[in-house]
Image: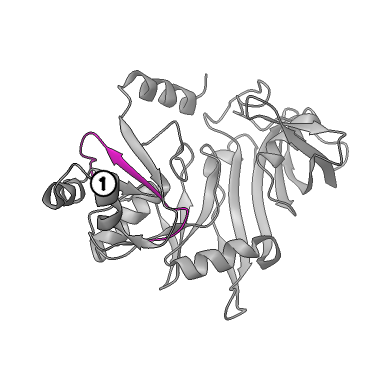
Amino acid sequence: MNKNEKKRQKLKKKAPLKFKEFKVKDKCFLLEFLISKYPSLSRNNVKHLLSGRYVSVGGAIVTQFNLELNKEDVVVVFDSPLRQSKKPSRLPIIYEDDEIIVIDKPAGLLSVDNDKEKRATAFRLVNDYLQAKDKHSRIYVTHRLDEDTSGILLFSKNNKIKEALQKDWSTLVKKRGYYALVEGTFKEKSGTLINYLKENKLNLMYISDDKVHGKKCITNYQVIRENEAYSLLDVNIETGRKNQIRVQLGHLNHYVVGDDKYGNPSNPINRLGLHAYELDVIHPFSQRLMKFRSKMPKEFLSLFKK
């Protein structure tokens, strides 16, 4: 059991938060939306839900009464107040302007909450950071990283830029670079992996010969360090399929270290050996190429002698 799995086991022992979840169907303001969902409560009692920190939107605590909601936003009302995140000193900011904020996400931190877990996330930490400067600020999920993958994660600061980026993400993104620490050595020191992925009932991805229903994924790799037991790869993905690097490399019996989701590889660095080190994306309005980079985690090099 790796360090992140132990952390998850500890969280499971805690009593789960009770909540009600509502999906927004049309643009509206948060206070009016909550009043419509709780007709038995007075307007002041609904305001207390907000001021008392019982409400989150998209995984981030919200206290602003006149926050504008967009279609498909998810509003969650908890049965107990939510604590504000501590200052995100462990969440270094790579870049920030009026439209986007880019962070270097630590391994073991969810990008956003999900249907099963409503706990600390990168989304919530960044939202708390921005609201400490301006209570009217808001962020939007633009893309995601797996919980145990570290590296570059981009959020939008308004719905217009978020929708523009997501609409043409595959076209606008010119490079998504990862460092992958895997088991074994490669006969071919560089190559391109092309496979089709499908998802099983356990939400796990697997390689399939089904080119009709499977999703095509393309991964390029280059060995940059190796020894008799491990290889360090520079990986660039041309498609953004769920878990594609982990699945494709595992299919070759070169499992990413610490990956207890796919296979049972060794865990010499006490974390998943996957780090998103570069994201190059064209701004959808100005057409400016934005390049964001993150340093390789030191532990990735710890297995290789100088």
In this rendering, position of residue 177 left or right of residue 71:
right
**How many circles with numbers are drawn on the protein?**
1
Q: Residue at x 24, y 40 (%)?
A: 82
Q: Give the quarter of the figure containing the C terminus.
A: top right
Judge whether residue 134 can be spotted in this image: yes
Q: Which residues are magenta?
A: 69-86
What residue lies at 44% left-to-right and 31% top-to-bottom?
116
Q: Is residue 226 left or right of residue 83?
A: right
Residue 179, image x, y percentages? 65, 46
Task: Where is residue 247? Give x, y as percent.
Answer: 72, 34
Residue 83: say if magenta. Answer: yes
Residue drawn at x 44%, y 22% as measured from the top left = 6
Q: Nearer the viewer, residue 153 or 235?
A: 153
Q: Disc 1 designates what residue?
A: 86
Res. 120 visible in picture: no
Above or below: residue 284 compared with residue 21: below
